[in-house]
Amino acid sequence: MKMRLSVQVATKLNRTHLLPAEITHLLPCLGRIEIDRQATGPQAVSMEDSTACIHGSRGLREPISEDIRSEPFIVASIAKATLPPNPQVDWDRWVGDYSLVRDAIEATYSDQFKDFNERMFTPGGFPRPLAARERKWKTPNGKANFTVPESLNNRIEQGPDIFQLITARADGQFNTTIYSEDDRFRGVKGGRQVVLMNKADIERLKLREGDRVKLSTAVDDGVKREYGGLQVMSYDIPEKCILAYYPECNVLIPLWHYAKESKVPAAKSVPVRISLDSRAEA
């Protein structure tokens, strides 16, 4: 890798950790299932789920090693070693009692985290206030307004042979960490090297299920981006749209192809061409 420095805090070793930079630090930390003992006793942490509900969590298992530290401990230690002292931030007290961190969060965002520590273990969690959840639209006309995005970058080619690639993760995957080669969500078993296509598109391209194909990014920027060895699989997906997994297909996404304001890579709409992979067929 060309990075000068890589620092990762992790609960479990995975492939990403085996791609070091010039200087690499891998800092193992406690997982949520392990008991986190600090100066004031066992600690609880909070987490927010995909529905914006806050849940509390306490570890139940003894740590795998007495030398493993918690994420708050590691972050606070790095901060103390690199930042000048700040009377407003008592790293040692925060590490010794995580509830003080939540008190500070509540003081900062009192409208969202009122009685944070008291409500943390409410069954089902407690929801952060979201106006849209209550069908309240904070817009000039009081209604939900939909906007039409601008057209795609003019470097992206257009044509009947161009498909929109959606990159996705499988159920046995957390972010880019892959725990299983199967995807029970989509009925994929035994490998991730697949491209899911509408049956009509498979027939139109004169392909067959099981054929190995190559995806090529359809952009005119002088950079060649290809990813092959993908097995064609029929799936209930709109025509001219295909789906394959990330991070494998990240190589197809141009660095400049991202959302205008957030700068998030446009990984759900990558223009590609599909062709038989001659190397896979050989």
Image: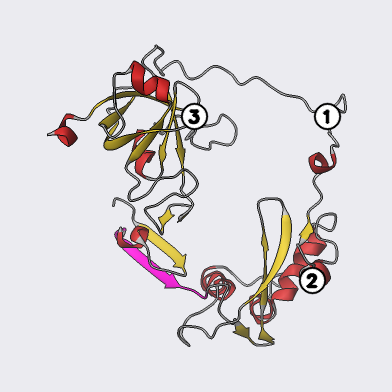
Query: How packed is label 1: few (under 14 Cα within 10 Å), some, or many (20 or more)?
Result: few
Choose the circle earlier in sequence order: 3 or 1: 1
Q: Pinpoint residue 95: horizontal percent, then vertical percent.
A: 64, 78
Between 1 and 50, the residue placed more toward the observer is 50
Q: Pinpoint residue 152: horizontal percent, then vertical percent.
A: 50, 19
- The Cα atoms of the two marked residues, 2 and 3, are separated by 44 Å
The amino acid marked with disc number 3 is Ile
* Quadrant hosting residue 5: bottom left
Is residue 29 a member of the stretch shown in magenta?
Answer: yes
* Quadrant hosting residue 12: bottom left
Residue identified by numbered label 3: 237
Rendered residue at 49%/33% (across/down)? 268
The amino acid marked with disc number 2 is Asn
Contact, mark 3 vs mark 1 (Cβ under 8 Å): no
| Image mark for residue 139 | 1
Rendered residue at 84%/27% (across/down)? 143
Q: Which residue occupies the extreme top position in the image?
A: 159
Choose the circle earlier in sequence order: 2 or 1: 2
Task: Give the extent of the magenta segment.
Answer: 21-30
Residue identified by numbered label 2: 117
Rendered residue at 37%/49% (across/down)? 189
The amino acid marked with disc number 1 is Thr
